[in-house]
Amino acid sequence: MKIAVLGSNVVGQTLAEKLNSLGHEVMIGTRNVKDTMARSGSDSVGRPPFSDWHTKNAGIKVGTLSEAAFFGEFIVNATNGVNSIAALEQAGVKNLANKIILDIANPLDFSKGMPPTLSVCNTDSLGEQIQRAFPYTKVVKALNTMNAYIMVNPALIPEDHNVFLSSNDETAKAKVKTLLQSFGWKSHNIIDMGDISTARGTEQLLPIWVRLWGILQNPMFNFKIAIGPKPN
Amino acid sequence: MKIAVLGSNVVGQTLAEKLNSLGHEVMIGTRNVKDTMARSGSDSVGRPPFSDWHTKNAGIKVGTLSEAAFFGEFIVNATNGVNSIAALEQAGVKNLANKIILDIANPLDFSKGMPPTLSVCNTDSLGEQIQRAFPYTKVVKALNTMNAYIMVNPALIPEDHNVFLSSNDETAKAKVKTLLQSFGWKSHNIIDMGDISTARGTEQLLPIWVRLWGILQNPMFNFKIAIGPKPN
């Protein structure tokens, strides 16, 4: 499948690499290709610059947000959550129309210091905002509740743990579920939360996620819903 | 220990019963004792009226919010989260002073329909509001992320699962940890989140919790933080 990964940071790179390794044709979309390729030094999480990564992953195309959105039959939103709507507008309503947007972004607002707050929550969510702003797309919120390495390789945590799906479109949800299974997600660990408004719940996992990261000093953790026997 | 459980609904009853069974002297505090005792028919979750429960648990005292707060050396806030500040004011600043308040309430607002939203979140939490409103108390937020039956009997879920602690006071946190262990919580499943502002994270687990309850059709579940090996 032709897949556009919008966003060139660690999350976008990790998703693009995995999708490419599974045989998909992948194009990373970035605001300004020249600027992205010219980045030097390590990025904010200590990774080498984008161009170094791209040299090792030359099979992955790089284009503008709109080139990538035009190219992809399937879109991954791995942009910074607080700027996702603007980035998707740049990608272009027409380029996105009738496509699935797998939204893995979180509306984390770092502008008021650490830990970040959410720029939207409780009575709305980024997933819903994207679905409203791009009504001719099929938004599926998923994978936003964990580190990028775990998203594409759930076996990094040996025990069972969960990924949540939210979407108004059942067919789109089924397609994303199949993609998640190709990443190694076991069917029984994929929880269908319901419509896109349930993204409120998964995006609101982030405040505890960022605190846990600090406490555990390890980003390799995820939420597991532990279930006991039903009461009589 | 003399313990006041503020709140006479299923959560308060369950906590009071467990604490009493462990040998504590317990008084349930309720706004209006006469009204509470006069309730007839099943309650909102299909349980028998309070007076029936109290007949079976005659060792548990029942008083007004202020009588209970005066009685208790240790306070459990099991009142309705959106009314907790008002209930604690009724309990009385002086009666609460220098005591630990174990805050197990959630600020769930059902006034806008189902599922409920949070009346405070993201940049503040009920735990913090209580700590600010009653600065001479030691607020410990805990147990608010699960069903009442699991709070007092974690073995209802056979596998490991977690309870989170948030408080500005380390001694209060240690006391609550000991109490949780007496309920059956294993030390390695009790996660110290840090100061009371971390209650934002645990209270924001509620939006996904209420959705999961509907999906699983079973209230006997809880969050488990699944942890993988640290990356090199």
Image (tube, coloured by chain):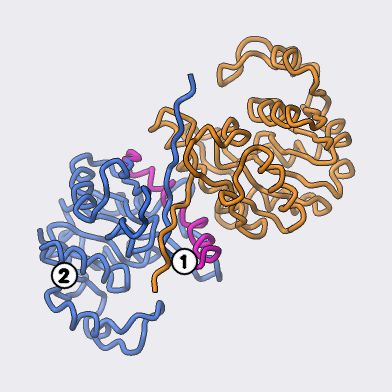
Chain colours: A blue, B orange
Which segment did they paint magenta? A192-218
Q: Where's residue A14, x and y in %? A: 27, 68
Quadrant of the image containing the N terminus of chain A: bottom left
Going by the numbered disc 1, the residue's amino acid type is Asn
Magenta stretch contains residue A163: no
Residue plotted at (38% across, 54% down): A126
- Residue drawn at (80%, 35%) of the image: B3
Which mark, by number, is residue A27?
2
Q: Residue at x 51, y 46 (%)?
A: B205
In the displayed structure, would residue A81 be above or below residue A35?
Answer: above
Tell which subunit mark 1 falls on: A
Mark 2 vs mark 1: in front: 1
**Could you tell me which secondary element the residue under label 2 belongs to?**
strand
| Residue A114 place in picture, x, y as percent | 55, 69
User: Tag 1 or tag 2, which sits nearer the N-term?
Assistant: 2
- In this orientation, which residue lies closer to the viewer: B131 or B159? B159
Classify residue B112 as left or right of residue A66: right
What subunit carries mark 2?
A: A
Residue B154: give x, y in percent of width and height. 57, 37
Residue under the image location 69 percent in, 39 percent down: B182
Which residue is more in the foreground, A216 or B82? A216
Check if mark 2 and mark 1 are on a common chain.
yes
Q: Residues within 10 Å of mark 2 (few under 14, many from 20)?
A: many
Amino acid type of the residue tagged 2 in the rendering = Met
Secondary structure at numbered mark 1:
loop
**Mark 2–mark 1 CB contact (< 8 Å):** no
| Disc on res. A218 | 1
Residue A132, x across and y down, in percent: 31, 49
